Image: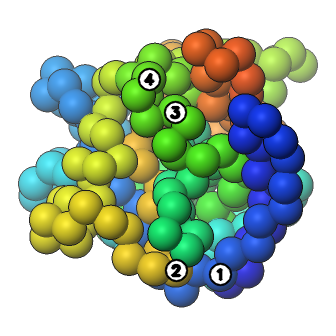
């Protein structure tokens, strides 16, 4: 799958084209056990079984990574989750933003299948990981949904609550410090404010308070009929 990013560095902008053939979703990626348990409980409230271990690394098809402004989903019971997106180009790591859009109805049957069935929207901007590595924990992820005619804050939290990319890469690779070539990883989320619920539009942001910059992306969800 080919993805195109505008690479924003502290000194310049450039265009970056990459190809991924392996897309990984890191689940249950909280650094704090209490935060993990909170996310497990909010999912259990909608019928999702507890994970066998934490973290887990779900493989989804690489063509589910999309940079479109609209995705399609069967039925009305899917929703987004804001997460950082780590990928490798050459010898360097980069960070962008993704939504682990998930079918919540199917999730109660199989978490792995619920992730596979939905597109994973990816932002169109990226930063060099080296520029944020020393203050990674201070970065903030947020999302908003459209609710009752207004944009409502849906998620917000610092990356200090989640495992670092280095930790997740080591967990996925069995101890290696470098993400495999042509691999992208979606790196975990924070809890939903007010509980998990669907929306026809999802907006997400990665905010760097140290360098005062953001990556943002919005997409709408077109609902396809669930034919019996």
Question: What is the image's colouring?
Answer: rainbow
Of the numbered discs 1 and 2, the one sitting upstream in the chain is 1
Q: CA distance from mark 1 to mark 2?
A: 6 Å
State whether residue 69 appears in this view. yes
Residue sitting at 84 percent across and 61 percent down?
15
Please name whichever residue, 89 or 84, is drawn nearer the observer in this view of the structure: 89
Nearest to viewer (mark 3 / mark 1): 3
Nearest to viewer (mark 4 / mark 1): 4
Q: Are marks 3 and 1 in contact (CB under 8 Å)?
A: no
Circle number at residue 135: 4
Nearest to viewer (mark 2 / mark 3): 3
Q: What residue is disc 3 on?
A: 132
Please name whichever residue, 225 or 37, is drawn nearer the observer in this view of the structure: 37
Is residue 218 rendered to the left or right of residue 175?
A: right
Q: In which quadrant will I find the C terminus?
A: bottom right
Please name whichever residue, 139 or 120, is drawn nearer the observer in this view of the structure: 139
State whether residue 117 appears in this view. no
Q: Are marks 1 and 2 in contact (CB under 8 Å)?
A: yes
Circle number at residue 19: 1
């Amino acid at each position: 799958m080919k993805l195109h990013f505008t690479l924003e560095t502290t000194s310049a902008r450039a265009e970056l084209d990459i190809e991924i053939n392996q897309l990984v979703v890191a689940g249950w990626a909280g650094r704090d056990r209490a935060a993990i348990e909170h996310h497990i409980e909010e999912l259990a409230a909608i019928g999702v079984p507890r994970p066998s271990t934490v973290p887990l690394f779900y493989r989804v098809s690489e063509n589910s990574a999309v940079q479109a402004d609209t995705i399609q989903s069967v039925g009305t019971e899917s929703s987004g989750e804001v997460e950082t997106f780590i990928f490798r180009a050459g010898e360097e790591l980069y960070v962008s933003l993704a939504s682990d859009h998930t079918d919540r109805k199917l999730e109660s049957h199989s978490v792995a299948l619920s992730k596979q069935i939905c597109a994973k929207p990816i932002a169109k901007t990226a930063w060099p990981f080296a520029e944020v590595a020393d203050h990674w924990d201070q970065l903030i992820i947020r999302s908003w949904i459209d609710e009752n005619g207004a944009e409502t804050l849906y998620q917000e939290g610092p990356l200090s609550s989640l495992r670092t990319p280095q930790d997740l890469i080591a967990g996925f690779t069995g101890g290696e410090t470098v993400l495999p070539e042509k691999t992208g990883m979606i790196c975990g989320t924070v809890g939903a404010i007010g509980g998990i619920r669907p929306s026809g539009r999802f907006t997400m942001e990665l905010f760097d308070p140290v360098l005062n910059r953001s990556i943002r992306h919005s997409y709408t969800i077109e609902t396809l009929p669930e034919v019996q």
